[in-house]
Image (cartoon, rainbow, N blue to C red):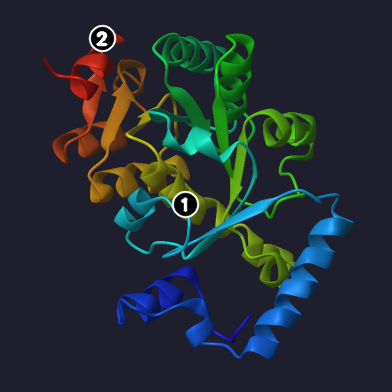
């Protein structure tokens, strides 16, 4: 809640002192007041059962430290153990083609068949298709959202979000009180920031379909920075309107001409 605080400035603050804890930077009174207010806010949103993961405490996933600006705290609902499964992110456009939706669904179902968790961001389009296909296939899915728990964007995904929160795993790094206090136009920045966390939580990211200015490319950059696999479907390379696939291939992304290209890269024998 401090003026000027961002995920970047907080990460820098903690990286400057490897032993630092959140309680080193705020008084107990401030912490208690913020905690009470955050819990009240979550309750108003209908969130009564949730957990937190804090760096240096409990089951915080060390793989999140691979992010350029790793988060110190996250909120979650559902089965935390799913974060320990092998997982791949399936992401892409919010306004995909029908072929893009079909490709996302096929990939999600194959991931389920191979024992992977399907990870995505619960946005419209490719994200929704991936989560839905994973559920239809009887698999496990993890949603990393760009809003606090109890809020959904887009609204039409609220039922799907509730189901994932109850039966699978819903993760949010968005600070509850800060989000509530911010003007609407600033809230959109949480979406690309969560993409970096989504990437760090997984072994790799599969981009199904994305435009030249898509937020999905934030996750592509994060995956390469974090040493994760970045997979780009052949159909993206065949689209004459975009240049990013060739650019990321030069930086180390894997061109997926057939599904086996994914499995060979993940488990080379």
Local packing at callout 2 (Cα closer than 10 Å; few below 14, some 14-19, many 20+) is: few
Instruction: Name the image quarter holding the C terminus.
Output: top left
In the image, residue 5 sits, relative to residue 68, either above or below, namely below
Instruction: Name the image quarter holding the N terminus.
Output: bottom right
Judged left or right of residue 100, residue 63 is: left
Where is residue 25? Give x, y as percent. 51, 87
Q: Nearer the viewer, residue 78 or 100?
A: 78
Judged left or right of residue 107, residue 129 is: right
In the image, residue 216 sits, relative to residue 41, either above or below, namely above
Which residue lies at the image location 59% right of the left edge and 24% below the top edge?
Answer: 131
Residue 170 position by quadrant: top right
Q: Which of 72 and 226 is in front in this view?
A: 72
The reply to whether residue 207 is in sight is: yes
Judged left or right of residue 175, residue 217 is: left
Where is residue 224? Give x, y as percent. 25, 44
Q: Which numbered circle lies on residue 260?
A: 2
Name the residue tied to disc 1: 59
Q: Tell us which disc is closer to us: 1 or 2.
A: 1
Which residue lies at the image location 49% right of the left edge and 25% below the top edge?
Answer: 118
Local packing at callout 1 (Cα closer than 10 Å; few below 14, some 14-19, many 20+) is: few
Q: Which numbered circle lies on residue 151?
A: none
Instruction: Mark 1 and mark 2 in contact? Answer it, CB < 8 Å.
Output: no
Where is residue 234? Give x, y as percent. 30, 17
Q: Which of 63 and 213 is in front in this view?
A: 63
Which residue lies at the image location 16% right of the left edge and 41% below the top edge?
Answer: 251
| Mark 1, secondary structure of its residue | loop
Which residue lies at the image location 25% right of the left edge and 9% below the top edge?
Answer: 260
Which comes before the other along the chain, label 1 or label 2?
1
Q: Which of 251 and 59 is in front in this view?
A: 59
In the image, residue 8 sits, relative to residue 81, either above or below, namely below
Q: How far apart are marks 1 and 2 (CA)?
A: 33 Å
């Amino acid at each position: 809640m401090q003026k000027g605080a961002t995920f970047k400035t907080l990460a820098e603050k903690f990286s400057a002192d490897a032993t630092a804890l959140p309680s080193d930077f705020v008084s107990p009174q401030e912490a208690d007041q913020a905690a009470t207010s955050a819990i009240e806010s979550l309750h108003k949103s209908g969130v009564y059962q949730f957990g937190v993961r804090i760096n240096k405490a409990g089951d915080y996933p060390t793989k999140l430290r691979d992010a350029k600006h790793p988060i110190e705290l996250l909120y979650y609902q559902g089965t935390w153990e799913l974060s320990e499964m092998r997982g791949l992110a399936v992401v892409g456009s919010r306004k995909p083609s029908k072929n893009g939706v079909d490709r996302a669904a096929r990939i999600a179902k194959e991931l389920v068949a191979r024992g992977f968790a399907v990870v995505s961001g619960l946005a419209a389009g490719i994200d929704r298709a991936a989560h839905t296909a994973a559920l239809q296939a009887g698999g496990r899915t993890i949603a990393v959202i760009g809003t606090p728990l109890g809020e959904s964007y887009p609204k039409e995904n609220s039922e799907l979000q509730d189901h994932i929160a109850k039966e699978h795993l819903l993760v949010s790094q968005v600070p509850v009180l800060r989000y509530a206090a911010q003007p609407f136009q600033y809230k959109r920045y949480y979406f690309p920031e969560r993409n970096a966390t989504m990437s760090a939580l997984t072994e790799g990211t599969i981009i199904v379909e994305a435009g030249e200015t898509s937020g999905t490319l934030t996750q592509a950059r994060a995956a390469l920075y974090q040493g994760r696999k970045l997979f780009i479907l052949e159909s993206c390379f065949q689209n004459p309107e975009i240049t990013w696939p060739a650019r990321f291939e030069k930086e180390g992304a894997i061109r997926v001409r057939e599904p086996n290209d994914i499995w060979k890269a993940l488990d080379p024998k």
